[in-house]
Structures are given as structure tokens and as C-alpha cells.
Amino acid sequence: MSEAKLKSKLTLFDVTNLVVGAIIGADIYVASAFGAGLLGPFSLVAWVVAGIIAIVLALCFAQCSALLPRVIGLLSNLPFLLLHEDHDQP
């Protein structure tokens, strides 16, 4: 019997879809129902404002990534971003 070989490679598209699916998940339906129950029609405005804030935050992270093209966490970059000090160099 021959065994099928599977590719163990994820593309950027695959990883992006996995992350978006994990973030959105089923909780978006619970959050929208909860918001509609509390805010009524104003909940649409709240979702739009939250979306704008998310876009601004994503642009901030993109700018930080452009300034520091290294693969490390944001908190590791804070001394460089705030104080312009690089602790990785001797």
C-alpha cells in the first residue's frame, strides 16, 4: 500500500485565514447580540467606531514593524521606540 505524502507548508494566505478565523470565531455573534441588547440601534455606530480603532491600531503596528524589521515582540522594542536605545547591540 502506498502512503500519500502531504505538504507541511503554510502560506501567508493560510496563516492569515487561520488568525482571522481564530479572532472572529463564533464570539462575534455573541458580542453583536449583547451589544444590540444593551445599545439598540446605536450598536452599529459602536461597531463602526471599534472598526476604526482597530484599523488605527493595525497601522500603528505596521509602522512599528517598518521601523524595526526584526522578528521580536513589541514589548522588546519599547526601549528603542520610546528612548531610541538599542539594547541588542554591545
Image: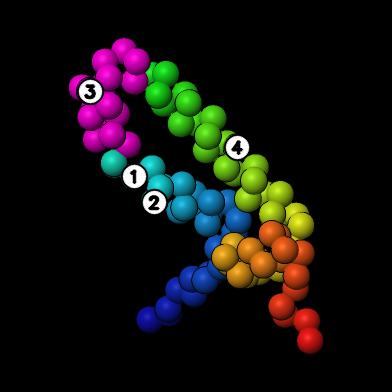
Name the residue tied to disc 2.
Answer: 22
Q: Position of residue 72 (x, y in %)?
A: 62, 70
Position of 37 relative to 67 (above/below)? above
Residues marked 4 and 3 touching at CB (< 8 Å): no
Q: Which residues are magenta?
A: 28-43
Name the residue tied to disc 1.
Answer: 25
Identify the image quadrant of the N terminus: bottom left
**Main secondary structure type of the part rendered in magenta:** helix
Residue beneath the point at 34% across and 20% down: 43
Residue type (three-letter) at the residue carrying disc 3: Leu
Q: Earlier in the sequence, mark 2 or mark 3?
A: 2
Residues marked 1 and 4 touching at CB (< 8 Å): no
Q: CA distance from mark 4 to mark 3?
A: 26 Å
Residue at disc 1, secondary structure:
loop
Q: CA distance from mark 2 to mark 4?
A: 21 Å
Q: CA distance from mark 1 to mark 4?
A: 22 Å
Residues marked 1 and 2 touching at CB (< 8 Å): yes
Residue beneath the point at 60% across and 56% down: 12
Name the residue tied to disc 4.
Answer: 56
Residue at disc 3, secondary structure:
helix
